[in-house]
Image: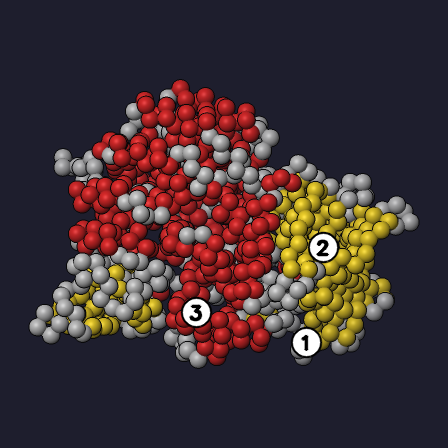
């Protein structure tokens, strides 16, 4: 470590101690001001454990005005006060305190605590933001009831919201307006929320399974009211689904969602008052793509489902984060699968896991889903905690089966409602409720790394016995790591493609040893195995079957996930072969014949669901191909993929044109997706006709999905349509920030040679600002994660561009800055020249003055772990 004196402290799970005192009730008054906002907090304390009289409250960036304990003003000599906390002595085992503090939300660019966005006040308290509003025991195992009175200028902030049910509102003698909210459900401070502003409201209602009428309210900036219908419908669907699937009913009289434009992440599940990034609320077909609509549905569901998995039952400490996040992601995945095509949803979930979580788990920031330590908790809202966490819950679901899983969940809710618990308590409830032993399974919580699976098979015609030998290794967890309990869902197919085992779902094998052999009797001829159906475990399958076997599975597997997977593996193999021969005279310029035949079969298979067909037709992305190589051959991969797109487009021009035409003008997501995949192959040929086809689609589009798909094809060309379409798009949508984000992203991901100049130029565009996280993600995030050729340019320009932005953002928004570090942390996977340049970029960051703990932790671990 280069920094010693200011190296931030590491927090360890093993050091967890229950709090000596608890806060059971909070009466909060927040007086909103243009200069100073005053927060008066009346707290009820009671003893929780032995351990002395000292009371320590967290607090950051606060001006302490006064402290009273049991009605007595405490003089400064009787308390200690640092920039992190406030400590005083408890007079007895039960007492009250009144604390007055001043804050300046208008100066808060970190977007944590109370801040202003577009002139409205809003909060973000998870993980440790409440301590930036007032002094408090800001830890999730301290759960209190809250009454919140918001006071302010009613002409500026007519809407004033907080958690719970509305208990009164009116005008004070001095003319200020107040609203009082009561939340009867004890909650940790991270679920506190407050919003005030001049907002429009869209209302609806939901009648729960026990007949209670719930008011549903979505608050948005004025003028956006007509973009809330999909969010509202998604909310009602989520409420109904949670009742039917898990027996969970909503528990307040009102459920509110507020959309804000400056938000560090997607959304936040504050009790009864979810605050959302407007990206996950606002949609109309003209302004949002089909993918945006799906994103809204899943994030609305996710935050709503947190009401039970996260809020009613919360985390004991932040090491348990996956308790609520993995479980809630699993639940939102189930919900989206029920609402849409389950197969396509599963494919997308696995793609996301592979794109973000697998590299994380193989790199310097690898951690188990229950980490043992952290420096800055906000850095631990990772793909591992969320997406791998969801896979772990899914495996429990697979091992228990639907019915026993529900029994386990019922017991979990019964046993722990109102508590702050650990992942161990969760697993124990699932085990007790189902009667299934999860002793070995628990290792998934503590082992980092993606297990690598190798499979060999044998068939003996004399005994009609088939055997599969399966081996698991997890190099990241170390050579002595004990084996995991891995569910392997298996199908065996005969040479006609028929299932040889009961039911199309096949068999579930329990892989519990390092190496295990499973035998199957009465198998008439050598079968083709379909392994890890529906991606039954988050593992890497090492052994690669022959092309013919993949082709066979691609055409015959009854498991749609594995069907798609076989096609992707075939494609990956071809692309890797092209990459390997990049510099040799036998360099192929098209994928193999087997692949082309399989692709041809897709083009005429009209029985397939169009969305599935579109997913199966798309080639694996450059990043995914890179992940399959020990050292990523950035340029060769780009060239191989582009050449493949081109050769497929040329060879199948007629079929692709037919598919394009057949699926044009259909008001159906799947058809749009299929048509736009066809367009991507056609434009890859670079023929003038097809570029003009994209230009026409751009101009004539009636929805954003088609418009953006067409523009995406044009941004990669030098054709005059490139500038024309980009200028038109900007002029058309200039006032819609979410649409302009797409304009930035498309240019950030373009591969044409001058793309890096374009990206640097965009930094100076009047619409660009580092203060808006969506804008940062749309340009800088999209470039670093989605433009491998230019980000990894051997000139080092991409790396310098990113490190410069990280250093700038470190000053205003360290959470967002830290999130941008991870692409550089992958340096070990690149050529020696690139490694040097990437490390140089990381070292520059590490040498920055006043480096935040957020950026320090990510950069330091990226270099040294
Ligand atoms: N729980 C929030 C994430 C909070 C992130 C804090 N840095 C959103 C979610 O997962 O639902
Ligand atoms: Zn969540």
Front residue of this view, candidates 774 and 648: 648
Residue 807, numbered label: none
Q: Which residue is mark 3?
A: 402
- Marks 3/1: CA–CA distance: 39 Å
Assess disc 3: are there few (<14), some (14-19) or many (≥20) residues with their C-alpha within 10 Å of its C-alpha: few
Compared to residue 564, the image places residue 589 above or below, namely: above
Q: Residue furthest left?
A: 462
Residue 48, numbered label: 1
Closer to the eye: label 3 or 1: 3
Asked if disc 2 is less than 8 Å from ligand 1, the answer is no
Secondary structure of the residue carrying tag 1 is loop
Image-quadrant location for residue 787: top left
Q: Position of residue 698 (x, y in %)?
A: 44, 28
Considering the image in quadrants, where does the C terminus appear?
bottom left
Assess disc 1: are there few (<14), some (14-19) or many (≥20) residues with their C-alpha within 10 Å of its C-alpha: some
Q: Earlier in the sequence, mark 3 or mark 1?
A: 1
Could you tell me which residue is drawn at 31 percent across and 72 percent down? 510
Q: Which residue is mark 2?
A: 162
Q: Position of residue 600 (x, y in %)?
A: 23, 41
Q: Residue furthest top?
A: 720
């Amino acid at each position: 470590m280069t920094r010693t004196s200011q190296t931030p402290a590491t927090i360890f799970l093993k050091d967890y101690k229950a709090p000596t005192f608890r806060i059971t009730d909070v009466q909060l008054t927040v007086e909103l001001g243009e200069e100073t906002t005053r927060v008066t907090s009346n707290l009820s304390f009671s003893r929780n454990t032995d351990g002395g009289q000292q009371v320590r409250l967290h607090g950051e960036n606060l001006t302490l005005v006064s402290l009273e304990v049991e009605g007595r003003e405490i003089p400064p000599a009787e308390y200690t006060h640092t920039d992190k906390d406030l400590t005083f002595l408890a007079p007895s085992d039960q007492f009250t305190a009144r604390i007055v503090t001043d804050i300046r939300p208008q100066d808060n660019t970190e977007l944590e605590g109370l801040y202003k966005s577009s002139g409205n006040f809003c909060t973000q308290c998870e993980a440790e933001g409440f301590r930036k509003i007032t002094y408090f025991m800001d830890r999730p195992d301290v759960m209190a009831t809250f009454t919140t009175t918001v006071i302010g200028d009613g002409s500026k902030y007519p809407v004033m919201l907080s958690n719970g049910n509305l208990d009164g509102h009116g005008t004070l003698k001095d003319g200020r307006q107040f609203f009082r909210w009561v939340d009867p459900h004890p909650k940790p401070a991270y679920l506190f929320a407050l919003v005030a502003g001049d907002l429009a409201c869209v209302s609806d209602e939901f009648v729960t399974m026990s007949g209670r009428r719930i008011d549903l309210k979505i608050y948005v900036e004025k003028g956006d009211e007509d973009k809330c219908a999909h969010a509202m419908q998604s909310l009602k669907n989520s409420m109904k689904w949670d009742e039917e699937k898990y027996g969970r009913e909503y528990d307040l009289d009102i459920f509110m969602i507020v959309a804000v434009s400056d938000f560090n992440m997607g959304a936040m599940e504050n009790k009864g008052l979810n605050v959302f990034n407007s990206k996950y609320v606002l949609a109309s077909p003209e302004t949002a793509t089909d993918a945006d609509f799906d994103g809204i549905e899943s994030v609305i569901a996710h935050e709503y489902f947190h009401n039970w998995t996260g809020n009613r039952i919360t985390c004991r400490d932040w090491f348990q984060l996956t308790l609520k996040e993995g479980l809630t992601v699993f639940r939102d995945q189930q919900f989206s699968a029920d609402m849409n095509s389950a197969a396509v949803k599963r494919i997308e979930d696995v793609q996301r896991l592979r794109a973000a979580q697998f590299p994380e788990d193989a790199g310097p920031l690898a951690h188990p889903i229950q980490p043992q330590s952290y420096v800055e908790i906000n850095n631990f809202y990772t793909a591992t905690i969320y997406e791998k966490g969801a896979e772990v819950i899914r495996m429990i679901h697979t091992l228990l089966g639907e019915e026993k899983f529900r029994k386990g969940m019922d017991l979990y809710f019964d046993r722990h409602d109102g508590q702050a618990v650990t992942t161990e308590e969760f697993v124990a409830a699932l085990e007790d409720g189902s009667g299934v032993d999860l002793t070995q399974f628990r290792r998934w919580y503590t082992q980092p790394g993606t297990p690598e699976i190798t499979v060999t098979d044998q068939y003996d015609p004399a005994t009609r016995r088939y055997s599969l030998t399966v081996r698991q290794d997890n190099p990241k967890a170390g050579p002595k790591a004990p084996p995991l309990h891995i569910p392997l869902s298996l199908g065996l197919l005969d040479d006609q493609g028929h299932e040889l085992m009961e039911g199309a779902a096949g068999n579930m094998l329990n892989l519990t040893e390092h190496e295990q052999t499973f035998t199957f009797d009465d198998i008439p001829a050598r079968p083709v195995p379909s392994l890890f159906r529906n991606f039954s475990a988050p593992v890497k399958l090492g052994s690669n079957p022959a092309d013919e076997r993949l082709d066979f599975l691609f055409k015959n597997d009854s498991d749609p996930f594995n069907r798609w997977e076989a096609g992707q593996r075939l494609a990956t193999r071809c692309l890797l072969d092209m990459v390997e021969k990049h510099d040799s005279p036998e360099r192929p310029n098209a994928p193999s014949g087997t692949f082309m035949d399989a692709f041809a079969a897709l083009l005429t298979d009209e029985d397939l669901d169009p969305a599935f067909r579109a997913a199966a037709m798309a080639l694996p992305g450059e990043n995914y191909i890179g992940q399959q190589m020990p050292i990523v051959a950035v340029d060769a991969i780009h060239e191989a993929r582009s050449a493949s797109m081109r050769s497929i487009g040329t060879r199948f021009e007629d079929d692709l044109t037919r598919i394009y035409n057949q699926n044009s003008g259909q008001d159906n997501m799947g058809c749009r997706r299929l048509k736009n995949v066809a367009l991507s192959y056609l434009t890859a040929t670079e023929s003038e006709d097809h570029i003009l086809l994209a230009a026409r689609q751009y101009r004539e589009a009636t929805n954003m999905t088609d418009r953006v798909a067409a523009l995406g094809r044009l941004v990669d060309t030098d054709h005059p349509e490139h500038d024309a379409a980009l200028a038109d798009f900007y002029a058309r949508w200039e006032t819609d920030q979410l649409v302009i984000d797409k304009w930035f992203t498309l240019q950030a991901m373009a591969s044409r040679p001058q793309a890096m100049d374009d990206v640097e130029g965009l930094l100076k565009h009047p619409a660009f600002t580092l203060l808006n996280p969506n804008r940062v993600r749309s340009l800088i995030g999209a470039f670093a994660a989605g433009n491998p050729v230019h980000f990894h340019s051997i000139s080092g320009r991409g790396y310098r561009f990113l490190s410069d932005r990280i250093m700038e953002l470190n000053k205003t928004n360290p959470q967002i800055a830290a999130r941008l570090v991870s692409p550089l942390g992958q340096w070990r996977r690149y050529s020696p020249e690139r490694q040097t340049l990437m490390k140089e970029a990381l070292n520059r960051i590490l040498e920055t003055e006043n480096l935040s703990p957020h950026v320090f932790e990510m950069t330091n671990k990226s270099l040294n772990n």
